[in-house]
Structure formats: C-alpha cells, structure tokens
Amino acid sequence: MIRENQAWMKVVPKLNANYYELLESYACRIRRNMPQAEEHALLTKSMKYRDVLATIVVGQGITYDELSENLDDFTNGEIDFAVLASLGRIVALQNINTEDRANGRKIIHAANENLPRTKLFQKYRQLEFELIFESASYSEAVAHLNANPELKEVQDGYLEVDMYNPFLGLENSEYTHWQQGFNKIFESCGRIPVALSGEAKRPFDRLTAANDLNRITDGPLVSVIMTSYDPEPEAFIAAARSILNQTWRNLELIIIDDASPNRESELLEKLAGEDARVKLVLLTENGGTYRARNVGLEVATGEFVTGQDSDDWSHPERIESQVKYMLEDPKAAGVMTSAVRTDENLSRIMPGLSPTRKCEVSFMTPLHLAREVGGYLDARKAADSEFRQRVEFYSQRNVGVIHDALYIIRLMPNSLSRGDFSSGWSHQSRRAFWNAALYWHSNTPSLSLSVKDEPKVPLPIPHRFQITKPAPSELDIVFAADWRVSHGWQRAAVDEVKFLVARGLHIGIMQMESPNSNARTSTKPNLQIQQLINNGTITQVTSDQEVKIANLIFHDPSIMQFPTSQESNLRVGKIIMAPFDLPSDNNGEIIRYLYDDCTRNTQNYFSANVEWSFLNSMSQVVGEAEGSGVSVLPGAWPLVLHLESWTGKNNLGINSPQKIPILGRSCQNNYSGWPMKETIQQLWPTDDSAEVWILGDARGALRNLNDKYYADNWVSFREGEIRPVDYMRAIDFFVYFPSEDSDENLCREAFEAAATGKIVILPEKFRDAHGDTALYSTPEGVAQLLEYYWRSQESYQVQARNVRDTLTRMFADGEVLEEHFRNLLTLA
C-alpha cells in the first residue's frame, strides 16, 4: 500500500483537508476489522461511510465519488483490491441510488480482475455474477460462470441452473435441463422432484408434485392455518392445493379471510367444495394475519398445528416429514423446515441473498401448546418468530429444524429495498420488536410467558406493527445513541434517562449505530436500556415515526459524521450535541468527528437547528468548537451519577494476608488509549504481586506490551461477561492512567468505582474533574499508594467514607441538577 501514486495526483480535492484527515484516521482504525466495517455500512445504509472504505483502498484520504470517477486510473496503481471488492459489495447491496447496482458491479469487477481466485474471495466473484444476471447480460453471465467454474458447485448449482430457466427469455433456456437442476435441492436430500402443470400465468403457480405419491391416512390430525387478504386467485389456489395434495392426508386446511374488501367468496367456496378438509372462516373486521391466525387456533381440531402463507408453496412431503419428526421426538416443542426463496419465475438468484433459509411460517407445534401460550401477539408483522421462540421458552423445550427445503417462498427482488429486509439490513422496527421479545422471553419465568388470559400485550409493539395506529406522540427528550454497548459513558446516558424520567419528563431513545462502536452484536441494545423499554419507562423511537420531539440529544456526534440515508419523519424542535468524547486526541492520530460536518449533516437530516454543549472537563474545546462556526450553549452539560446503583455489599474484602490486591481499569479495544509498555508494567503488574481485572477489551494493551497473550494475573472482562456493578464491587483499587499524550481528564468508571467504595488512583490532570473522589499520583508513585492502603484497612475505610461524602455533594442534589437541565433544554 502506498500513500502517493500517479492516480492520486490526478484527483483534485473537493473537500477541506480536515475531512481527509478524518477519513485517514478512521481508515487506520477499521482496516484491521473489515467485516465489522461492512456490517456497519450495510446496517446503517450510510453513503458517507463509503468514503472511509475508499480511503483504505487508496491509502490516502479520498471520497467514494473521487475513487469511482477515476477508478481506471487507480486500478493501474497500487491499491488494496480486497477492500475495493468490499466497497463494491457495500455499494451494490446498499442500493440506495439508481446507479448503485451498476457502480458496485463495476468496482467488484475491477477488484476480481486482480484478486487471487481463492475461496476467501469467492463471495465477490459470486456477487459479480449475480449482478450481471440481474442486469440481464446473459451472455456475459455465461462467460463469467465459465471463467469461475467453482461457482457452478454453490448450493446444488443453482447459479448455473437459473441460466437455463425457460421463463426468463434466456438464449440458453431449456426446460428439461432447468427442471433437473431445480430439483437437485429436493433430490439431494431424498425428496421427490417437482414439476409444472396447469394454465396459470406465472410458473410459480404451476408447481405440482412430479409423480403420484403414496398417501398416508393413519396418524394424528394436523391443522394448517392459512390467512388471506384480497388474495390473487391463482397464487391462492396454488398455495391451498399444495397443502391439500400433501402425502399426509389427515389434515384440515383452515382458511381465514381477514375481511378482504374485494372478497372472492366464489373462489373460497369453490375451494371448500372441492375438498371436505377445507374450513372457511370469513372475518368482518381486518386485524392482520396474526390476529386471523389466532382465530384459526380457536377453530382448529388437530393434534398439531402449522401455517401456510397464501402466496407460497409447500412441498408434498412437508407435513409428513414434520409429523414424523414430532412423533419420533415427543420432547420437541415443535419443528420448522427450511425454505427455498424464488421469484414468480422460479429464479433463485437475488444479489447478496442465499436461496435457502429457515421458514418461520412452517413452524409446527402441538395445538394444546399453541393455545397454552396464548397464540400470536397482536401485531401486524414479525409475530411468527416471537411466537415460535415463546413456545420454546414457555415449554423449556427446543424447536427442531428439518434442513431439507420443503417450502418455497415467493419473493420479488424489487420489493426487498422497499420492505423490511435487504442483504445485511433489517428495518429498525423489526430489530426493536425482536429485542423486546427476546428480553421478555429471557427475563420472565417460563409459565408467565403465556398471554392466554392477559388483556395487555406484554411488550412494546413498534408503531409500524401496531394494528390500530395511535395518534402521533410527543416526547420531551429523545436520546439518540448506539445503545448496543455498555461502557461507562453509555451508563452515564442511562443515568440521565433515569433521572429525567424521575422528574416527570417523557423520555424516548433511538438506536443509531456509531462508526466508533465496538459492539459485539449487530442489533441488541444493552440490558439496562432494553429493560426500561420493556417496562414502559421510556419509549423507543424509529426514524419513520411521526413523533414530535422537543429535544433530541446526541452524546456521540460521530453517529452523524457518516449519517444514514434512511428518511426521517420525526418533527424535532431542538438538537443538542453533548459529546462525552473529545473530537480527537492530542496528537491527532484518532479523529472521531468534525464539528461542522456533524452539525450540517444533523440539520439536514432532522430539519432542525443544532447547538453544542460540553462537560466541564471539556472546556478546553469550547473555543475550538465556536471557531468552527457552530453554536455553543452557555453553561456546561451536567454529569449524572445514580449513586444508589453502586451501593451494596462488596463481594471481596481487603487486607487479607492470603490475598493479593485486585487492580481494576476500564478500556475499549484501542491501543492508543493505553500508556507505553514501561508505564503499563508499573501500574498494572504482569507478575504475581497483584491481580489485574480489565473491564472491557484489553487487546490494545497487548499491542503496547508487544505480547500476544495476557499475563497469567490479567483477566479481561469483555462486554456482557460481568455486570459492571459486580466488577466494581469485586476489585480493590481502580487505577486509570490513559496514554501519555492523551488530553483525557475525566473517567466515568472512576466515579463508579468510587461510588462502590473503592480507592481510585488517577493522574494529576484529572483533579479538576474528580476532586476529592480520587487519589492522584505519578505512575512512579502508584505502587507506594497501593502498598499503604492495602496494608492499612482503617485508612482505606476512612478514604472510602470521605469519597462517599464528596460524591453525595456532587451528584445527590436533584433540584440543582434538574434546574441545570432546564437551562439547557426546551421544556414545558
């Protein structure tokens, strides 16, 4: 990789130098974790984040537009083709602008031309083929497939099979060849092949069994529930007949019409007249598919119950296979099958998507169990996965999966970007619902998970999924943050939320992913926030809602450095950027955000003015912010610490002759936040003189220590492995010294340790912010302080009591704190 080449010299910079420096800073940090960078770009649908990837490609600050416009020149130079392929994948799968598919394909092609043909990069060769196929460049697709024969082996060769699909108008189309290839997914697992018959307009609706089947008439009755709302007749008939033609004959098909405004009564009655196993229920009020399914559960008479969507198709052996699974494993709570997803022409190629997946609607469970848990929640969408998971938690038994593809899902590619899913992305409401459901299931006694006799829905249903849309709501304050992590500053924000709720304000939160996040999960928020959401203390807001927000608060401005492209319907009065992190470190190696960029991006996105407010400990940057042209509020942003959360009995005592002290320190996976090797060894020994417990990811320390593994006396508790309060109660001392060139002068975790009754030792520059809550020293003097307080329990306890009194004076006056907030916010 080089920082200068001829291609770079041809580009005329279009942005200020600060932005290029920021791009280089981000590029340096994320280069080591490209999978997380890809995930972030797809999850946020951020176009600006493409600039970071472009900078990694070239090795010097550059925007995506500049790289794209000069791609031919750059590919003649020395660039990172693996990252170029990743960038092309992001652009194509984000698919935000009309030209993104074509541009992504062009970028991936340039990368594939230069990458080695190894398994590691096969996904890019496959995506290039999928994009070529989607664009109807079939001769080019054939050439690409022939040049990359390994792609012909992917998942029963479905990529090559689609090249022969006779319903796509391809030059090489041939029905028999295509049918044989299409059936590989069934025949490879011993299932009977399928064929097409009849006069339906769409090939999907002509699916049928390929030959006569043995009919199984003995065994338990199965109730299959299929809901419909203004069904397309041919699709509806095909779906129903796929159930009626099952090898398992002892079934009833319960069709619930959900008050279709153009109800096809003749169609429904004709179907019922053809087969006595069909039961019709015609609803007079529309309530969504899950409310209709609950009606089906009421009228069902089978031993087992399962579902069928009215535009999908079930393989004729599906029900037989599921019943046999349940009979052979009576301890199972249920069983699902896998599914093939195709479009109406039975083509399985959809860029970035696997042709197979687990099928929630196929979930089969004993009818009594479905009724015991109370059926489906009252929601328009997403309740099938919640229902299946609740059955598992309630019964304390597992749901099995038959990996054979016994269900075919009808899926139109053009609908993906407008719906709730695309490759690497799901709608905010989907994520909110999943997280609320998982928290409820995981934190509720199993028998209390039944909603059978509950008049109230036990978890918040996202606005988008509610059956009866409520009136637009109004909130006093919404905190927009990346709630997936649980470090000290995130807990400070949680304390703010709790304090303001206690003062009678209506508070909301909004999940917005940060490019600086070290989150180990793509979707789940931290447990504190999810608990507040589930118990109704706060409201979760998504950007597509019509909500009136008086004050929108960001504690992490970098969220808006590379903003999402998703639209916002929020009506925001006032926006305050109140950062907990400085915009950069002293030496400029780490640049987190630019004042003017974040202000401009936020104003454009929310159509509201932005003002800034800083903690007292960050007063040194106020002039810098004002100099960049942004508006800074008078008065500092208050720091909140909920003292009661950190009180309680310590898990470990001190001054035991059989015990060495436990030294604590917090961190994130960032080597520049640690001092150099000699200082680390002074403060947190790597011998047996003390135990060192790190709250966070300590791999940054290993880099500075030039070690691959932690010393035997070091323990790193990464996120979720220990509750912070339990960690603080267990350590004996909290010693926090950042890197030598850091301008950091406040540590939230140090306050938490002090509130838990532990002695805190900090460098002198932290004195203004921490006052008498800590002891101060040079690195050389820390060992003496540790020795003194470790040997003198009385001195330790006196220091702890004095610190507690200081903390009470600093944080316990709620009236003063409320007045401080009211001076900064717009509140009624």
Image (spheres, rainbow, N blue to C red):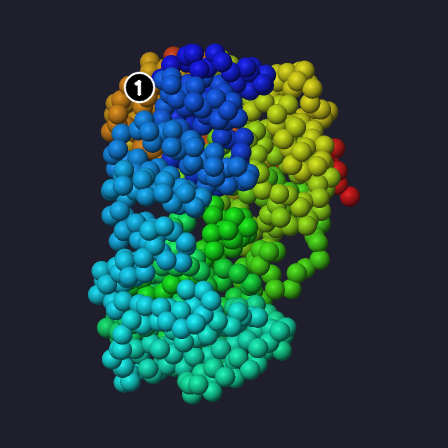
For residue 240, above or below residue 605: below
Please give left or right for residue 517 compared with residue 262 in the image.
left
Circle 1 SS class? helix
For residue 774, above or below residue 781: below
Quarter where residue 823 is shown = top right
Quarter where residue 188 is shown = bottom left
Position of residue 47 measured from the top left corner of the image (x, y, whole percent): 53, 33
Position of residue 57 measured from the top left corner of the image (x, y, whole percent): 41, 23
Q: Nearer the viewer, residue 145 or 678?
A: 145
Position of residue 75 measured from the top left corner of the image (x, y, whole percent): 39, 22
Q: Residue at x 28, y 61 (%)?
A: 176
For residue 426, above or below residue 455: above
View extreme (right): residue: 828
Q: Residue at x 42, y 31 (%)?
A: 107
Q: Residue at x 50, y 37 (%)?
A: 100
Specify few, some or many for label 1: CA neighbours under 10 Å numbering under 14, 14-19, or 20 or more: many
For disc 1, the marked residue is 705
Q: Is residue 609 visible?
A: yes
Q: Residue at x 67, y 45 (%)?
A: 570
**Quarter of the figure that contains the C terminus:** top right
Amino acid at circle 1: Leu
Q: Is residue 455 visible?
A: no
**Quarter of the figure that contains the N terminus:** top left
Quarter where residue 653 is shown = top left
Q: Nearer the viewer, residue 614 or 617?
A: 614
